[in-house]
Amino acid sequence: MITLEHLTNLSSGIPWGLWVSVYIWMIGISLGAYTVTMAGQVFKFEEVKRVAAKVVCLSIATLLIGLLSIMIDLGHIERVHFLFAYFNPASVMAWIVRLYNLFLVVLVAALFLLAKKKRMARIFCWLTGLFSLALIILESFLFAAPPGKLWHSPVFTLHFLATSLLSGSAAVLYFTSIGGTRKEIKKERFVFQTTLILLVVTLILELAELFHFRGVNQVNGFYLIGGYLLGLAFLVIPNPLTRIASSFVIILNILSSKYNSIVSSQTEEPFLGFSQALIDPKLTYAYRPNPLEWTATFVLLLLAIILTLLLYKLYKLAFEPRKKEI
Amino acid sequence: MAVPADKGVIMKEEKILERKMKRKEFLALGATAGLGIAAVSLEGAGISGAGGLEQVKNRWPKNSDILLRMQDDVTRALAKPREERKWVMIIDVRKCIGCHACTLGCVAENILPPGVVYRRVIEVDLGKYPNLKRNFIPIPCMQCEEPPCVAACPVRATEQRVDGIVDIHYERCIGCRACLNACPYGVRCADFGRFYTAGTPQMQEYELRPSFEYQKAWPRKKGKSPIGNARKCHFCINRIESGFLPSCVTTCIGKATFFGDKSDKTGLVFELLSRNKVSTLKEKLGTKPRVYYLGLEQVGVEL
């Protein structure tokens, strides 16, 4: 526990730090990528069909690593099963834990459908795509629901939704761009256009938070906007390498965006003079992740990449020979 | 049965006259007793006229110790079924001198580790030199009637008791800290297993002593509750159930904190709530706190 305390720096007035940001970032990629893929499947875009299995593997990996990052942040990790044993219907967290498990089942089912039939039933794509979209909105309520917080800004849920979809779309863009030629990239425009629209919407919402609602740290906000603009600059160049660079910049920038929106609100003292309230130690509302927290984050990120590759490898091993037989 | 119109009017006038007479008699009684508004409030509280007030006055003369009176109130409340008790706290910020005795009393009572404080006393500085004003506002858990923390807990580890106190089931809490973020008053803390004497040549045994929160012994052992849990003020449930006042009430030097059963119409807290203009923190959020403040408007800021 001593280690955990140092890792999460929660002796300060900030209950949720970097690991919670990583959690919503990972979950956002998982849900966003799946939603964009299902939209591509519904409207029969070849580029999406080509990478669907890879995206589903990524969704499974990021979902699992996202849940792992929130688990290591718990005070009593050994009691994690209580989340299923006791249910509070009024708690958003209680619902999302159950729905994530359902989403995992959906992802596994999607992977099997892709392997068996090479294409999924349209109704399945519709339903599960909408389900993942609803999950992103529900996830945002975890932060938007508590009263008296800056998360209460009118655009928080929209911002949350836009960033999650954008991170997912950028991940799909990475898969479609890898190994692609200039000609193919010019022809396949669905993922590019989706990413572009979402990026513009995210930029507008980020600016709204920054200048109007003040729900985010303003200094960090300027860097964030710079990051999005860089991603945009890379995105508009029709080159596979710049598209890959763009997807990386966007995905990493969204981690900063999630971190900024989660932590900024908690740096507000509940009352004037609250930081003078404690005798030992003084309650601080400043938060900077320590090296151990960063290390754990890099390990989690690495794990997510390894797990995606491993899952895709297993998928190919399990289903490729059958294709040959046929 | 139909009543003739003129007879109906007469009956109405008679009733009005009767009411006027009753009001006159009552006012005369009130004036004779010289009790003013207090008498009205106590009459409303079910203490019959001057006799009831006399009864309370005889038992608790003006210069009697309020701690003894509150102690008596708690004893009386405990005789009632739990669901009939409504524990409330009243804090008079005009009397608070910012000595932090309540904070330390609470730390000693509940063996609180570093970083866990149930009752903060915030210092609010207002104005500019030489017109400077400093106020002290103790902030315990508000034991809200509509607690956002209870709704946030995914495992129902925090619940509202029938007597209004919001408690935490230490053995069920998973330490997700959703309740910490849900609380608009910032009164919940996370226990990360720290010790004041950690890193010194010898760990002091007093830090390992168990606390007796929620009427159970909780020794401080790594990996065992309350380490890793969310923690908060519970109005010293263990003390109340044994017939004692909360630690912060008994340690308050300025006698600025009052505690008792709101439903006891002869109790001190009921009297204070009836006689004074009280306010609560962050009223707009609709959490309906059970901690009331006297003189908060003098602080001059919206809290």
Image (cartoon, coloured by chain):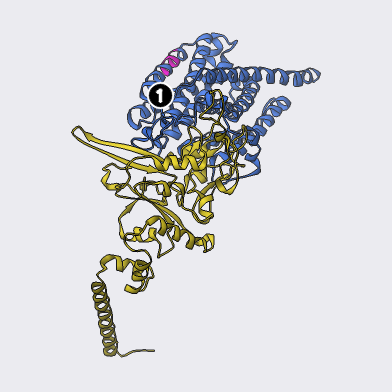
| The N terminus of chain A lies in quadrant | top right
A211 lies left or right of A145: left
Whole-percent x and y of residue A282?
41, 30
Q: Label 1: state its secondary structure.
A: helix
Res. A14 in view: yes
How packed is label 1: few (under 14 Cα within 10 Å), some, or many (20 or more)?
many
Residue A214 or residue A189, whichever sits in front:
A214
| The C terminus of chain A lies in quadrant | top right
Q: Is residue A94 magenta?
A: no
Give the residue type at disc 1. Leu
The stretch of residues the image draws in magenta is A228-233
Count of numbered circles in the view: 1
Which residue lies at the image location 50% right of the left edge and 40% below the top edge? Answer: B179
Rendered blue, the chain in question is A
Residue B192 or residue B161, whichever sits in front:
B192
Residue B235 or residue B203, whichever sits in front:
B203
Report the residue that reaches farthest toward the right: A325
Rendered yellow, the chain in question is B
Whole-percent x and y of residue B58?
35, 68
**Quarter of the rendering containing residue A197:** top left
